[in-house]
Amino acid sequence: MAAFILARLLTLLPVLWGVSVVVFLLIHLIAGNALQMFLGTQVDMTPAQMEELRRLFGLNKPLPLQYADWIGRVVRGDFGVSLRTSRPVLPDILARLPVSVELTVLALLFALAVALPIGIASAIRRGTAEDAAIRVGGLIGLSIPNFWLATMLLLFLPGRILPIASIGVYVRFFADPAGNLTVLALPAFSLGVVLTAVIMRFVRSSMLEVLGQDYVRTARAKGLRERLVITRHALRNALIPVITVVGFQAGYLLGGTVVIEEVFALPGMGRLALNAIAQRDYPVVQGVVLVIAMLFVLTNIVVDVLYAYVDPRVRYE
């Protein structure tokens, strides 16, 4: 297992390098003249003054040299300086990272807690009215945009009726666990509904495939109780493809917190990125996108390890 984990970590390096190149090029090619975009049309500067600013920020160099300077600083933990606040970018990102990660984890836990039992029940009761109702519910869940759901929850559950719906008030978990979970309950629910539907459908299809295997029929023929057939023989094998889906969706959830954080006024990375985009603060945008991409890649590594733990055959392929 240690060799498998080491091999996966080694594959992480070229992937992260590729991610850094893509992030750098996207920001710079889309932004064009970043300084002019930042200053806007109201600031009247001479070409000499603009060139001096470009020299100070290193924007007068060719793109390969700009990338080399930037990636060298990133490796040392220097993500640059915000054009708006003149503060280092990385501390601001790290201060907001726990909010986004906690919101993602809560949404994922909610989705798993609901989707796993419902998906299993739907597979066991295939063809019944309960199965049909669950499948229709899953389609509805897939069709609801999370930002629309979040807005509707805020409209119909205002803070004066339910404290759980208060917005703009965030407390750290270790400072007030109950208050923290209360504030994040609706955002996590809004973010997790679509994921619940996705996981439920995968669990159902995977369970149906496993329940048709010979070893399951053999276990039933031997007189093993149905509950043991499901929990001991079918469930573990059915969860193998589900792990991959959950891992990929967790990465997408982290990126999907952008809108939810803005709707509920949560001080996370997504809101930081939106504010930076509005203010044309491209070093902050670049830093947030890079951190989210790195977390997505790391999540995939964790999924590979879990996959190998559940299915040992993967370690020897």
Image (cartoon, rainbow, N blue to C red):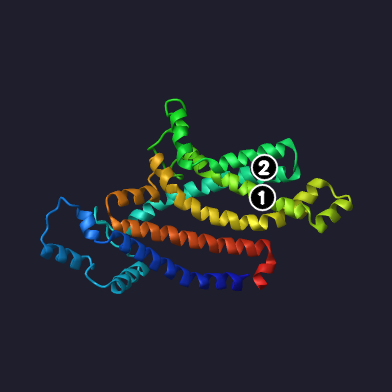
Q: Is residue 3 visible?
A: yes
Q: Is residue 269 above or below residue 146?
A: below
* Residue type beneath disc 1: Val
Q: Secondary structure at mark 1?
A: helix
Q: Residue furthest right?
A: 222
Marks 2 and 1 close (CB-CB < 8 Å): yes
Point 53% across, 53% down: residue: 250
Front-lying residue, 217 or 226:
217
**Amino acid type at image mark 2:** Ile
- In the foreground, 264 or 21: 21
The residue under the point 79% across, 57% down is 213
User: Viewed as shown, does residue 88 lie left or right of 241?
Assistant: left
Q: Residues within 10 Å of mark 1 (few under 14, many from 20)?
A: many
In the image, 220 versus 25, the foreground residue is 25
Q: Position of residue 219 (x, y in %)?
A: 84, 54
Q: Which residue is mark 1?
A: 203
Per the image, the residue denoted by label 2 is 118
Q: Position of residue 1 (x, y in %)?
A: 63, 70
In what quadrant of the picture does the C terminus appear? bottom right
Residue 7: image location, x then y, percent: 56, 73
Q: What is the quadrant of residue 33 in the picture?
A: bottom left
Question: Relative to 294, is 34 on the left or the right?
Answer: left
Q: Earlier in the sequence, mark 2 or mark 1?
A: 2
Spatial CA span between label 2 and label 1: 9 Å
The picture places residue 227, in percent across and down from the top left corner, at 79, 46
Q: Secondary structure at mark 2?
A: helix
Q: Is residue 130 above or below residue 78?
A: above
